[in-house]
Image: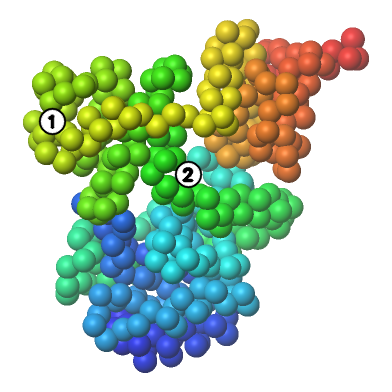
Amino acid sequence: MVNLITSTANLKSFCAKAAKKNYITVDTEFLRERTYFSKLCLIQIAYRGDDVSDSALIDVQSKNINLNPFYELLQNENVLKVFHAARQDLEIFFLEKKIFPKPFFDTQVAAMVCGFGDQVGYETLVKKLALITLDKSSRFTNWSQRPLSNNQLSYAIADVTHLRTVYEELSALLEHNERSEWLDEELAILLDPKTYDNNPENAWKRIKTKNNNLVFLSFVKSLANFREKLAQSKNIPRNRVLRDEMIIELASIQPKSLTDLRKSRLLKPDNKKGIIGEGILAAIKKPILLNEEEIKKHTFVEVKKLQSNGLPELLRVLLKANSEKWGVAQKLIASSADLDDLASLDSPEISVLTGWRKKVFGNDALKLKSGEIALSSKNGSLKIIDLKKK
């Protein structure tokens, strides 16, 4: 039977017991399909043990509960808080209470550091480390409906009970590989308020486009700013206002009137009138210009294209080889943008050239760039040749 907490008194009692432990595991269930901000529906929590009382589900929708005991536990620095793929969980706590759980451990990030691949799922880790196959049939159920079914309760509690084993196995592996400091560098990013920035003026930076014309980008920035403000004010998903591809099209055709707007291929009829249609035209009429820093960055992008000489491709080959050598996910070491910056800029300010990444990849990447090493392939394996010894 699952321990379902629906009152402040029971929550306070459970949190008092959890506060005496060296770590707790935490997860949340929330809805976001129809809203801009996540709607928290359920919190799962467990501490070390195998009794029903060692884990609990906190019904945040109960009228008889105040979550302050839980938030106090999150900030208790004597207790490690363990999550899996915690970004959205942390965003909820930060936007709701302006707090982060400290100290903090993310098993997905730890698994990447330990060589389990890019963004490995909880189900996979439980199967590999706890030797248990999870029933994920309740994954996409509506967590805001009450009462919760027995299947939902069982599914939800499993997200924190097996997480205890996953954490302990990964923690031991990190210590054995002497990579605990590597993990600390990654977790610091998740605990940075900038990670959860939802400033409308920065929303355009998430839109992927190959067009780096500064005038075009100013229209993208203006339209994305309008979309974000409207989505936040109405608490609706940003794609309900405008999808990214719509913004790119509008920035290209730059409609001046509702008649022009009706010529759009991608806009739905409802997007061509009313508050959205008027907002689009206003954003196009007065585009938000890029600031000096943004202009500098996107000027570099154009320079990169002109200077491309195959080095980015060689760096990708080297990244794959070093990723396999060290047993660390490629995506965790360097992004595609990092490799482009490394290839084109004299002194790029990228994480690849700091901390553990420099040891794993950055040093070799700089040697390849300066011509100190070369790459050779034989029988399907990559070999690094030190040209200074020739």
Q: Which residue is painted at 55% across and 36% down in the image?
A: 331
Sort mark 1 into few (<14), some (14-19) or many (20+) by Cα contacts within 10 Å: many
Residue positioned 62% across, 24% down in the render: 341
* Residue 1 seen: no
Callout 2: SS: loop
Q: Which residue is identified by label 2?
A: 119
What colouring method underlies this structural image?
rainbow
Helix, strand or loop at mark 1: helix
Around disc 2, counting alpha carbons within 10 Å, would you say few (fewer than 14), some (14 to 19), or many (20 or more)?
A: some
219 up-or-down from 164: above or below? above
Q: Looking at the rendered structure, which numbered label has been put on residue 117? A: none
Does 31 appear above or below 120? below
Q: Indicate the position of residue 338 as horizontal and vertical percent values.
A: 60, 29
Q: Give the residue type at disc 1.
A: Lys
The one nearer the camera, 4 or 97, is: 97
Image quadrant occupied by the C terminus = top right
Q: Is 88 situated left or right of 326 in this image? A: left
Residue at the outermost front position: 286
Q: Quadrant of residue 52?
A: bottom left
Q: Judge from the rendering whether residue 247 lies leftward or rightward of residue 52; answer left or right.
A: left
Q: Residue drawn at (31%, 87%), measured in percent from left and top?
A: 7
Q: Which residue is mark 1?
A: 272
Q: Residue at x 27, y 71 (%)?
A: 153
Q: Nearer the viewer, residue 304 or 77?
A: 304
- Of callouts 2 and 1, the N-terminal one: 2
Residue 101 placement (x, y as % from top left): 53, 67
Q: Quadrant of residue 14?
A: bottom left
Nearer the observer, 255 or 308: 255
